[in-house]
Amino acid sequence: MRNRFADTFYELGKADNRLCVVVADISPAGSIAKFRNEFPTRFINTGVAEQIMIGMVAGMAQRGLRPFAYTIATFTLYRPFEMVRDDLCYQNLPVTIVGIGGGVTYSTLGATHHAQEDVAIASTIPNMSVIAPCDPSETEAATRWCAGQQRGPVYLRLGKAGEPDFSSKAPEPWQFGKIRQLRPGTDVCVLSYGPIIKQAFGVADRFQARGQSAAVYSVHTLKPLDSEGLAEVLGRFARVVVVEECAPNGSFAMRLQQLAWQRQAKCRIDAFTLQDAFIHCYGSHEDLLAAHGLSVPDICTRLGLN
Amino acid sequence: MTVMDRRLPERGRNSIDAAAARRRCRAYRKRILDISQQVSALHVAPAFSCTEITDTIYHELMRKAPDGSFHDVFLMSKGHGCMIQYVILEEVGLLSRADLDAYCKPNGRLGAHPDYETPGINASTGSLGHGMGLATGQAYGEKLKNTDVLIYCVLSDGEFQEGSTWEAMMMAANLKLDNLIGFMDFNDFGGLERMSDGHRAFYPLVPKAEAFGWESVEVDGHDAEAIVNAVTARRGGRPLLLVCRTVKGKGISYMENVPIWHYRSPNKDEYQQGLKELADAAE
């Protein structure tokens, strides 16, 4: 995802000299390094200083530029939170904050590097849009949208590198603000976003193996939430499963449950989120998800599929 | 390309009308005292300490395009000082009398902190420690656009207790932003106490700014001519910070250096006394 973002940004940046990238001491991966070499004045490194990273992109946007702030997810939102809220969101500036390694992607680094509440926190701020693509293909579509939009600030939550493709052959195109069917189905619907969608497909496969037709949707835009699209899903399926890499409070699952209550949905909803806990576990991304109870076998057991 | 009057006052020449500047500043203070009798939610003393600084920037430093719009940019980083900006914007016609009459009223658009995209307001501030970062981004943006626009930013001295201000100071110097000029309203008071009593390590200020790569000089922040001279005498090539020595509540004896006037609004008697002091000062 990181590399596809970089390739896409580089390509867009060649054509639009308003596009700039401001990083806070993160090594420029892939094509961002190429962008830096070709357009050195449009690549700025603030060093280990995230408050000025956000302050600068806000000021640059106020003077007509289209900057992206880019660093590890926790440091894009948590350290400079008030700059994100006041400078970007209150002033409603068209700036994209790219958070690399959302959720527990940085699985060996401990909770200081886990953006396990990022989607929930970003979604609470007025004017902020929140996008979490599931794979490189959605990352490209989202990056293109971010570079061209006038709507306001966006938190673009990415994984790291090496994520497989899930969506390039999807029956529906990526569209900001709309849920996206990646696999059709009729009995069960699995809703997910971000790289943890691999778990969603694993769960859907288990439903299939038991003779139940399971759809998978990418809820790539967490804010604004596609309430109508989701209400349609809640009405159409008897069972809806949420698999997400975010802490439970303020999660997509919580908002979906609220929507289900408001719309008096009859379906059953099973929600699987990160725990409301700092889990002192170090290992692979899979290991961390498992420690939070989000391995495919664990989810399937709790769904009664074993 | 339109021809603009982009001249800055010439070095060493007394190009300003100091008496006119004093007249304007007395009128601004009176206008703010008048408003304080309509709405008590305003920061009088913080506005009075940066009255001359703000007046000088608007009337002596910022250049205008032929259509009368400002070519340069003003940012009030100390958002609680915005009353002085509002009354100046009223005077130059960017805000109306009706705007100021509706200050802090639900049908108005002016609050006790400035709000971005209100005419003449180039940033939403109020939370301290944001303006220098915004100004740095704006100054760099103008560099990328290859313009000669200057960014003038007024900050409270208290804002220099915020780490974010120093992140911005370091970055602005890294980027050699010679189009960024900061004015520290050095009145030595936070909301609570005299900083030189409670925060001794905050001083000295000019060497700190210089150590962060800025050109810096201390001036009398109530002396328009000194401010203009300090700006025109700059060596250049880097951002400039004027450490402007000021008196919080300047011009009204009972407000000067009395912390409560950070927030308080004068009662009727105090208002009358204030008007009298301003009138006496005119003689």
Image: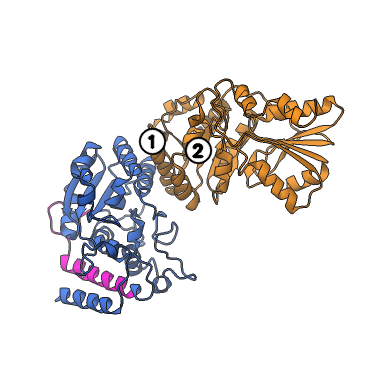
Chain colours: A orange, B blue
Q: Is residue A273 visible?
A: yes
| Total labels drawn | 2
Residue that appears at 66% across and 44% down: A254
Q: Vertical placement of B186 versus A146: above or below? A: below
Q: Main secondary structure of the magenta part?
A: helix
Along the line of sight, which residue is nearer the eye, A203 or B53? A203
Whole-percent x, y for residue A112 in the image = 48, 31
Q: Quadrant of the C terminus of chain B?
A: bottom left
**Badge 2 amino acid:** Asp
Instruction: Examine the image and state in which quarter residue A240 appears.
Output: top right
Residue that appears at 39% across and 40% down: A52
Instruction: Examine the image and state in which quarter residue A179 appears.
Output: top right
To which residue does mark 1 refer? A49
Tell me, for residue A16, which label it has, or none: 2
Whole-percent x, y for residue B268 in the image = 30, 79
Residue that appears at 61% across and 34% down: A275
- Verify whether residue B164 appears in magenta: no
Label 2 to label 1: alpha-carbon separation: 27 Å
